[in-house]
Amino acid sequence: MDNKRIVVALGRNAFGKTFPEQQQNVKKAAVAIADLVEAKYQVVITHSNGPQVGMIQTAMTEFARLDPDDRTVAPMSVCGAMSEGYIGYDLQNAIREELINRGIYKTVSTIITQVRVDPFDIAFSEPSKVIGRYMSKEEADAEEEKGNYVVEEEPGKFRRIIASPMPIDIYEIDAVKALLDADQVVIAAGGGGIPVLQQGSHLKGASAIIEKDYTAAKLAELVGAGTLLFLTAYDKLTIGKGTPEEKVFDTVSASDLHQYIKDGHFPAVTTFPKVDASIRFVTADKERKAVIANLEKAKEGLAGKTGTTITA
Ligand SMILES: Nc1ncnc2c1ncn2[C@@H]1O[C@H](COP(=O)(O)OP(=O)(O)O)[C@@H](O)[C@H]1O
Ligand SMILES: NC(=O)OP(=O)(O)O
């Protein structure tokens, strides 16, 4: 193996929706990561946070509502930071335990990671990530009064929808690299990282959630990883599912994927970010590969025995 560095992006299926569910589910991710560590990879893990950040935002909003004179609603960037801490906590403990059970003693740490976004990113005027609990029409109107966007998901049921800008840079990248150089396991840029706007020496949290697939590709580029591994609930990338034209990919090139995108495959809210992030990662350096595989078959996916391998 030439390049031992790998970024592993864990999807929502690695966590579940409740505190006990998450603690249980991360054990599967821990097995996948420990397999890679045993195979001598230097592993950086990043992950989804959609359901968790929604839960945290709902909780913090209710907390503020109990005493509106004294409490303010937590900014989305703070909710993102909380989600990094909470998910990282469960994940690092599960990985630590799995490694110790295999006789491997390595520190596993979570880095609260900030990611630079562009204040002029078009995403700020075209929000696309739905978050938080359902609101009534009155509550939705009040959110809009404050300058927030809302979407009517079902008749009379509103939710907040926020921007998902592209990641430009990762501020804590030197810390991630230092830990990798020390052969430690790192969890970084969870939930796409905390989006921030650079204002001189000040980093101002942005009201946004970055798509974790794009941040995973940025992280992989910045740490010099040879492989970007997306672990999801599915075995392989598929198009035309359930139709006579169904195609299941074992391997696929970036140029073929471009054509499939042009032909309208890969829905914007599901597979497109993963496919687009993979294309960006592999086309920048022909030695790189991206793999999309099932969380429970990570090792096999990496070996090309299952999953979909994307190359330039
Ligand atoms: N190989 C695949 N085939 C079809 N759909 C997929 C595949 N991988 C992911 N998806 C879709 O993309 C969504 C996002 O995937 P994943 O990264 O696992 O979770 P997250 O929602 O946290 O990004 C999934 O909910 C699923 O609908
Ligand atoms: N931040 C992010 O992309 O989270 P999800 O994958 O849960 O949508």
Image: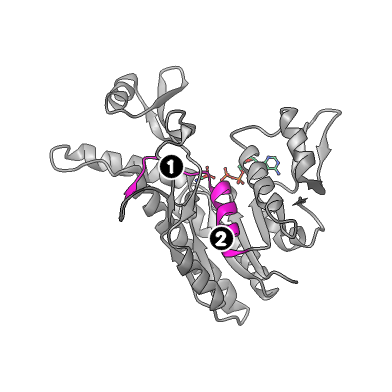
Amino acid of disc 2: Leu
Question: How was this image coloured?
Answer: one colour
Residue 294, percent from left and from top: 70, 52
Is residue 39 at all visible to an observer of this figure?
A: yes
Task: Tell me the SS state at disc 1.
Answer: loop
Q: Is 206 in the magenta? A: yes
Estimate how packed mark 1 is, as few (under 14), some (14 to 19) or many (20 or more) residues with alpha carbons within 10 Å.
some
Residue at image point 48% right, 53% down: 169
Magenta span of residues: 203-224
- Indicate if the residue with disc 2 has its beta carbon within 8 Å of ligand 2: no
Residue at image point 28% right, 44% down: 74
* Vertical position of residue 68 compared to residue 306: above or below: above
Task: Give the tally of numbered discs.
Answer: 2
Instruction: Give the spatial CA distance, label 2 vs label 1.
Output: 18 Å
Answer left or right for 275 relative to 219: right
Locate residue 70: give its quadrant. top left
Locate residue 60: give its quadrant. top left
Q: Is 221 in the magenta? A: yes
- Can you identify the residue that label 1 sits on? 118
- Can you identify the residue that label 2 sits on? 222
Residue 267, percent from left and from top: 65, 32
Name of the residue lying farthest toward the right: 244
Please state which of residues 172 and 15 is positioned toward the viewer in this rendering.
172
Amino acid of disc 1: Asp
Quadrant of ligand 1 in image = top right
Answer left or right for 189 relative to 297: left
Residue at image point 46% right, 28% down: 126
Residue 46, percent from left and from top: 54, 57
Please state which of residues 36 and 178 is positioned toward the viewer in this rendering.
178
* Vertical position of residue 53 compared to residue 2: above or below: above
